[in-house]
């Protein structure tokens, strides 16, 4: 490796390689704090306990700022930049809390070796006043000139450039710097803290307040939302020189030769480095922006308690990776439990994130309900109301297409029985509108056996609201196109089958997706073994196929029938004891939610149908549950394709088998790529 290619010294922290386990550095503090407080040990000022507590409070403050900055409904009106955060930025800013660990270690060294920084009182008013003036003078002055020095060619290219890679900032950006810079910044903070030693007045509370205030202002400056109200500057004009605003600092990241100050723009004014657009940008943002309505909306719901923590405004780094049940998430379980209760009582559909594809603005709106709630009969009406309100809001704001995700297609028990009866599906698989209208107006009387059938249908993920047909029928004048996206889901499963396949074994075969897959395969002379206990539903699907192809259907009633078939398509949860009938080397394709557990080591398992987004998509920084980065579930992609193509029809009810190839080709044309089983 050449000298030019070597990484400059002091760019990474000593604990950089520990990644998420870096806080083991503070384990000695925990041990000493426990020993001092519970085993009569000695720790001057109870220092270790205070260092742990202040670090926890600083982390909590950083999390609150991150949550605030990503809550679209709160910040959208005063957001400075839109759509700039990427997965790469989230990765780069993983160590944004390194400065907290470093400052604890350095402060502890001073506490041990400098007598004036020991035996501190808990509170001293003089010290709090003193530290304010020291910060406003020496600290701000030194930081300003150090910052300008860091913008000289050598230091900027080798060190400070790392911070400026984040052009569109988030609160975490505030702590992102090379280790050399962190040491220098810690020294600058030390000017104010150590100054109180010589002037008198140092206290434990002073350390808490100074560090927390410093972090508060740094996070605010990088939050990408102008939260300082215009009336504050009108009432107190001098604040223009003594208080930084998020819009003021954002200009330093887009035009790095201006706005160098820490928290007081006075030093920029004195040295002629104020960006000429600072006031204009502030006035424009504080006036409030009218958000551009999205062209496309994907409408999923919360899946389960732990995966809910993956939402973008809760755990930033976790959201940027495919969901898996990490051990640390269990400690946070009370948060989603409390959220579930609150959302059930007061929750409304909310925006999780937005992105840009070609000229299309896409957003993901989330129905505030968890998966298990879709199986509670008393919740059905409320869930349908939430979905309906989202559709009407999308229609009101000018959204072109709204795609229903996961169980949001399954929320009307009365419609379920009708949809699955042979009277509902015409030969093409479309819903007869008169039947839906009758069901909606008069309801369906069910005895106990019918109720059991309804719940069985629900577990098979059938379209209880007709995949959106219920809402289209109720609101015939909708301008927004309602789609279920399952045509592309079916296409992904079908195109993922091995070339030349002659026989498949299916469960969940009479579901909406199962029906479409079976009919498509039979048209291509593939033998389809359909596992179902309902001969009536099996016969209804067979009658949809041309007469000369119906012999390719086979009704089976147990898993033993698939013992010689290596292509299994799972549309229903399959137990381990049932999977054992599959021969060695079988691949399990699946469209069941949640996915089937991998019980066989001698077989392979596909994940849910998904597609990779086109490479020019912008603004994605969150993974869609278990999907890899820049990969979305097929029903999500299907809605996007519907929007990109400008199709004017609603895609509701049963899947039109004739459109499967058409939708697949359209997806490929727009740059969507199929995802291999192991990738999704």
Image (cartoon, helix red, strand yellow):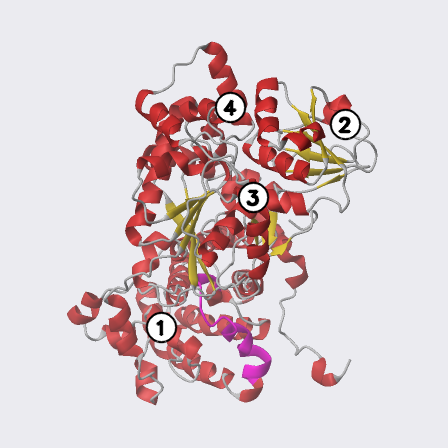
**Dots 4, 3 in contact, CB < 8 A:** no
Please say whether residue 160 is one of the residues in the magenta stretch: yes
Residue at 31% x, 44% y is 392
The residues bearing labels 4 and 2 have C-alpha atoms spaced at a distance of: 27 Å
Q: Earlier in the sequence, mark 1 or mark 3?
A: 1
**Dots 2, 3 in contact, CB < 8 A:** no
Q: Residues within 10 Å of mark 4 (few under 14, many from 20)?
A: some
Which numbered mark, 4 or 1, is in the foreground of this view? 4
Residue at 80% x, 36% y is 601
Residue 375 picture location, percent across and down? 47, 26
Instruction: Label 2: state its secondary structure.
Output: helix
- Give me the disc on residue 658: 3
- Judging by the rendered image, the residue that carries numbered circle 1 is 263
The residues bearing labels 1 and 3 have C-alpha atoms spaced at a distance of: 63 Å
- Judging by the rendered image, the residue that carries numbered circle 2 is 562
Residue at 47% x, 16% y is 451
- Give me the disc on residue 422: 4
Residue 45 visible, this angle: no
Q: How many marks?
A: 4
Q: Magenta stretch?
A: 155-172
Residue at 78% x, 26% y is 581
Q: Earlier in the sequence, mark 4 or mark 2?
A: 4
Residue at the far top: name it: 448
| Nearest to the observer: residue 235 or residue 145 | 235
- Give me the disc on residue 373: none
The residues bearing labels 4 and 3 have C-alpha atoms spaced at a distance of: 19 Å
């Amino acid at each position: 490796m050449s000298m030019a290619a070597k990484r400059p010294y002091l760019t990474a922290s000593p604990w950089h390689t520990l990644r998420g386990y870096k806080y083991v550095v503070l384990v000695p503090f925990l041990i000493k704090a426990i020993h001092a407080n519970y085993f009569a040990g000695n720790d001057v000022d109870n220092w270790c306990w205070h260092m742990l507590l202040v670090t926890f409070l600083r982390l909590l403050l950083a999390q609150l700022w991150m949550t605030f900055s990503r809550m679209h409904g709160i910040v959208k009106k005063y957001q400075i930049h839109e759509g700039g955060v990427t997965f790469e930025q989230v990765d780069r800013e993983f160590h944004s809390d390194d400065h907290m660990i470093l400052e604890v270690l350095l402060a502890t060294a001073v506490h041990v070796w400098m007598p004036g920084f020991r035996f501190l009182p808990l509170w001293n008013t003089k010290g709090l006043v003193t530290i304010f003036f020291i910060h406003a003078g020496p600290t701000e002055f030194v930081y300003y000139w150090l910052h300008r020095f860091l913008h000289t060619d050598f230091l900027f290219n080798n060190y400070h450039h790392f911070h400026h890679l984040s052009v569109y900032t988030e609160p975490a950006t505030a702590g992102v710097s090379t280790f050399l810079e962190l040491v220098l910044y810690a020294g600058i903070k030390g000017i104010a803290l150590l100054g109180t030693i010589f002037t008198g007045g140092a206290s434990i509370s002073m350390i808490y307040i100074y560090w927390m205030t410093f972090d508060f202002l740094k996070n605010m400056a990088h939050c990408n939302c102008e939260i300082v109200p215009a009336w504050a500057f009108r009432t107190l004009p001098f604040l223009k020189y003594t208080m930084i605003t998020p819009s003021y600092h954002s200009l330093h990241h887009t035009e790095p030769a201006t706005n160098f100050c820490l928290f007081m723009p006075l030093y920029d004014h004195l040295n002629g480095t104020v960006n000429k657009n600072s006031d204009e940008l502030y006035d424009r943002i504080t006036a409030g922006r009218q958000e551009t309505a999205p062209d496309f909306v994907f409408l999923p719901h919360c899946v389960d308690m732990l995966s809910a923590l993956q939402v973008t405004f809760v755990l930033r780094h976790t959201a940027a990776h495919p969901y898996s049940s990490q051990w640390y998430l269990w400690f946070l379980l009370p948060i989603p439990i409390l959220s579930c209760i609150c959302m059930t009582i007061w929750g409304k559909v909310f925006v999780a994130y937005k992105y840009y594809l070609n000229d299309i603005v896409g957003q993901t709106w989330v129905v505030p309900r968890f998966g298990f709630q879709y199986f509670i009969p008393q919740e059905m009406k409320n869930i349908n109301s939430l979905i309906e309100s989202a559709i009407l809001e999308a229609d009101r704001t000018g959204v072109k297409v709204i795609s229903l995700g996961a169980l949001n297609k399954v929320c009307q028990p009365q419609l379920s029985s009708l949809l699955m009866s042979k009277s509902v599906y015409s030969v093409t698989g479309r819903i007869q509108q008169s039947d839906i209208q009758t069901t909606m107006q008069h309801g369906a009387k069910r005895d106990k056996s019918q109720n059991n059938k309804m719940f069985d249908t629900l577990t098979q993920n059938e379209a209880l609201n007709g995949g959106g047909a219920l809402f289209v029928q109720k609101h015939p004048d909708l301008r927004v196109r309602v789609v279920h996206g399952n045509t592309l889901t079916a296409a992904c499963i079908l195109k993922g089958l091995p070339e030349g396949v002659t026989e498949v074994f299916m469960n969940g075969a009479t579901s909406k997706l199962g029906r479409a897959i079976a009919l498509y395969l039979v048209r291509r002379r593939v033998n389809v073994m359909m596992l179902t206990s309902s001969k009536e539903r099996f016969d209804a699907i067979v009658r949809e196929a041309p007469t000369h192809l119906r012999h390719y259907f086979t009704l089976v009633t147990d898993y033993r029938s698939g013992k010689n078939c290596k292509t299994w398509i799972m549309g229903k949860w399959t137990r381990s004891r049932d999977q054992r009938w599959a021969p060695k080397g079988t691949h399990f394709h699946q469209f069941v939610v949640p996915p089937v557990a991998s019980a066989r080591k001698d077989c392979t398992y596909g994940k849910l149908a998904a597609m990779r987004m086109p490479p020019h998509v912008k603004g994605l920084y969150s993974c869609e549950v278990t999907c890899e980065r820049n990969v979305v579930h097929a029903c999500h992609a299907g809605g996007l394709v519907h929007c990109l193509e400008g199709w004017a029809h609603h895609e509701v009810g049963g899947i039109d088998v004739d459109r499967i190839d058409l939708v697949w080709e359209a997806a490929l044309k727009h740059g969507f790529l199929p995802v291999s089983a192991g990738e999704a």
